[in-house]
Image: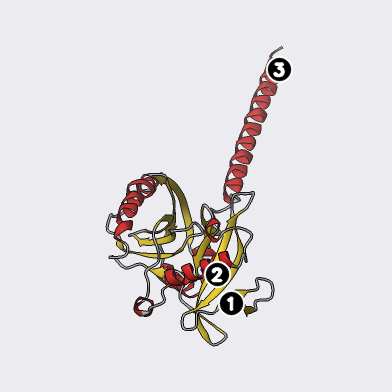
């Protein structure tokens, strides 16, 4: 009888030990799976910076550098803005310099001076009070010492608005904020001295196109956007202007592009398919 009792206790002990081992194995597999899935999570990315109809390639797309840690959309007085937070490292300054060069040389953005950017100061304050506060709450609060921000702008797809890219550097991060606001690009010194300004060119082009019925609709029904700077067409210095129309999807698409010469007031129509420009007046 005693031998039987000892045998039963041994079996119960073995069964409990087996269940305990199974539990340990289950926990180990669960933890391993959890960390593997965590490591497989896609990093935060943004190929383009987009505000309504306006967009430009992001700093990581252009430079293939930079670690995006947060995207902070906000709205103030009906104006949408998005702040992209990047971790600052040894290559950050080089990436920023490369991106600024891309904005200016390839996309035609113009740096706004402090005077030209006075109207933006309120927007910058909005950025700090909304998006930046969110970023500070998401991580240990960064030093409020921000290196003087740089702002670059190009004419928006929407008439009389600027599409702006603001770059700020902090202690641990740098921030790229995109937004739109009312305004026009500053005129360069040569244009200011010229008797035939961009506004003159627009009025001249409008009068010709409307009087010749060259468009399906009146000129004012289209969104007109001037090129940054001037172009040489048929050995003549010209203002370039593109006309856009809103499509069914709500996005603007280009209808036509023209060049108006400063000296001879010649109008050239640019062929969007062939890239050729033909005088039409």
Write down the residue under mark 2: 208
Q: Is 63 situated left or right of 94 in this image? A: right
Mark 3: which secondary structure? helix
Quarter of image, res 4 = top right
C-beta proximity under 8 Å, tags 3 and 2:
no
Residue 95 spot, x, y in % from top left: 45, 69
Q: Residue 113 or 260: which is nearer the viewer?
A: 260
Residue beneath label 3, please? Answer: 3
The span from disc 3 to disc 2 (Cα, nearest Å) is 115 Å
Give the secondary structure at mark 2.
helix
Are discs 2 and 1 less than 8 Å apart at CB?
yes
Marks 1 and 3, the one that precedes in the sequence: 3
Question: Would you say 145 lies left or right of 136 here?
Answer: left
Q: Which one is in front in this view, the residue at disc 1 or the one at disc 3?
A: 1
Q: Which residue is mark 1?
A: 281
Is residue 144 shown to the viewer in this render? yes
């Amino acid at each position: 009888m005693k031998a039987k009792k000892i045998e039963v206790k041994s079996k119960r002990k073995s069964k409990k030990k087996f269940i305990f081992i199974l539990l340990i194995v289950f926990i180990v597999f669960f933890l391993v799976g959890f960390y593997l899935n965590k490591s497989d999570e896609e990093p935060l990315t943004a190929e383009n910076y987009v505000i309504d109809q306006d967009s430009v390639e992001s700093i990581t797309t252009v430079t293939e550098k930079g670690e995006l840690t947060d995207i902070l959309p906000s709205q103030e007085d009906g104006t949408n803005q998005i702040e992209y937070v990047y971790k600052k490292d040894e290559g950050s300054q080089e990436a920023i310099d490369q991106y600024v060069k891309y904005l200016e040389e390839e996309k035609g953005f113009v740096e706004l001076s402090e005077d030209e950017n006075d109207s933006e100061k309120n927007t910058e304050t909005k950025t700090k009070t909304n998006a930046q506060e969110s970023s500070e709450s998401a991580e240990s609060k960064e030093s409020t010492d921000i290196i003087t921000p740089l702002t670059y702008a190009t004419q928006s797809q929407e008439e009389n608005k600027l599409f702006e890219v603001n770059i700020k550097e902090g202690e641990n991060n740098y921030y790229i904020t995109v937004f739109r606001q009312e305004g026009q690009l500053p005129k360069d010194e040569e244009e200011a001295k010229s008797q035939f300004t961009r506004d003159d060119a627009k009025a001249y082009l409008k009068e010709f196109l409307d009087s010749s019925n060259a468009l399906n609709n009146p000129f004012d029904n289209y969104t007109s956007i001037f090129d940054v700077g001037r172009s040489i067409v048929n050995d003549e210095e010209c203002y370039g202007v593109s006309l856009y129309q809103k499509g069914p999807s709500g996005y603007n698409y280009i209808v036509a592009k023209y060049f108006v010469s400063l000296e001879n007031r010649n109008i050239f129509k640019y062929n969007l398919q062939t890239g050729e420009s033909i005088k039409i007046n």
